[in-house]
Image: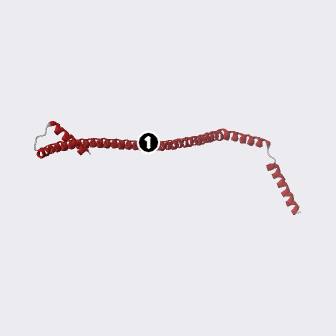
């Protein structure tokens, strides 16, 4: 019996515990629920809204930074490609300038050579004319000297004085002999 009494006491204790702790007191429940709702509202307005605003601003800032970085990257790539195109164009232009300079130098060299050749030909022609004139003068001097020698020799041979007519005939015969 004593075991029954102990079990009965344990059963009553459990029953009391269930009645007191498991089945809530409605007034206490409503007050605790109201306090929870107020706590949630205070948390919502004091912590959640400002934190969510800060997080939204931060997300917008990060998004804007990413967009600006992408735009800056696109601009940099565009500028790099434009610079590359400008460099290529400059290299082509430099190559054209060098090619034109080579052509102009070749033309100038050719013109200079032609001018020099013309000058050489002119000087050669002048020299040939001078030589020809000197030859003619030398021939004329030789003719005059020969005529003098021939007259002197013919006077000696003939021992007489030759008249103008005979003199002219002898000179012409002698000149004809020299020209042959």
Q: Which residue is drawn at 57% across and 42% down?
A: 74
Q: Residue furthest right?
A: 1
To which residue does mark 1 refer?
A: 100
Q: Which residue is drawn at 11% across and 46% down?
A: 156
Judge whether 3 appears above or below 142 on screen. Answer: below
Judge whether 106 appears above or below 7 on screen. Answer: above
Q: Position of residue 141 (x, y in %)?
A: 18, 42
Q: Tell whether 58 sits left or right of 163.
A: right
Mark 1 surroundings within 10 Å by alpha-carbon count, few (fewer than 14), some (14 through 19), many (20 or more): few
Q: Nearer the viewer, residue 55 or 63?
A: 63
The quadrant holding residue 139 is: top left
Q: Tell whether 158 sits left or right of 18.
A: left
Q: Which of 75 and 124 is in front in this view?
A: 124
Q: Element at badge 1?
A: helix
Q: Position of residue 10 (x, y in %)?
A: 84, 57
- How many circles with numbers are drawn on the protein? 1
Of the 4 image quadrants, the one containing the C terminus is: top left
Q: Tell whether 158 sits left or right of 83.
A: left
Q: Tell whether 97 sits left or right of 2.
A: left
Q: How is the image coloured?
A: secondary structure
Q: Where is residue 68 in the image (x, y as percent from the top left)?
A: 57, 40
Q: Which of 121 and 68 is in front in this view?
A: 121
Q: Position of residue 165 (x, y in %)?
A: 17, 36
The quadrant holding residue 31 is: top right
Of the 4 image quadrants, the one containing the N terminus is: bottom right
């Amino acid at each position: 019996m004593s075991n029954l009494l102990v079990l009965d006491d344990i059963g009553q204790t459990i029953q009391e515990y269930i009645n007191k702790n498991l089945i809530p007191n409605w007034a206490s429940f409503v007050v605790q629920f109201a306090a929870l709702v107020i706590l949630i509202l205070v948390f919502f307005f004091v912590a959640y809204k400002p934190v969510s605003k800060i997080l939204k601003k931060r997300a917008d800032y990060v998004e804007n930074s990413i967009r600006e970085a992408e735009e800056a990257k696109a601009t940099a790539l565009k500028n790099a490609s434009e610079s590359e195109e400008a460099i290529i164009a400059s290299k082509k232009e430099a190559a054209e300038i060098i090619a034109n300079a080579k052509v102009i130098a070749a033309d100038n060299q050719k013109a200079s050579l032609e001018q020099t050749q013309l000058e050489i030909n002119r000087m050669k022609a002048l020299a040939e004319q001078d030589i020809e004139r000197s030859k003619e003068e030398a021939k004329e001097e030789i003719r005059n000297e020969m005529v003098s020698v021939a007259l002197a020799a013919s006077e000696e041979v003939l021992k007489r004085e030759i008249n103008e007519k005979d003199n002219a005939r002898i000179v012409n015969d002698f000149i004809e002999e020299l020209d042959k």
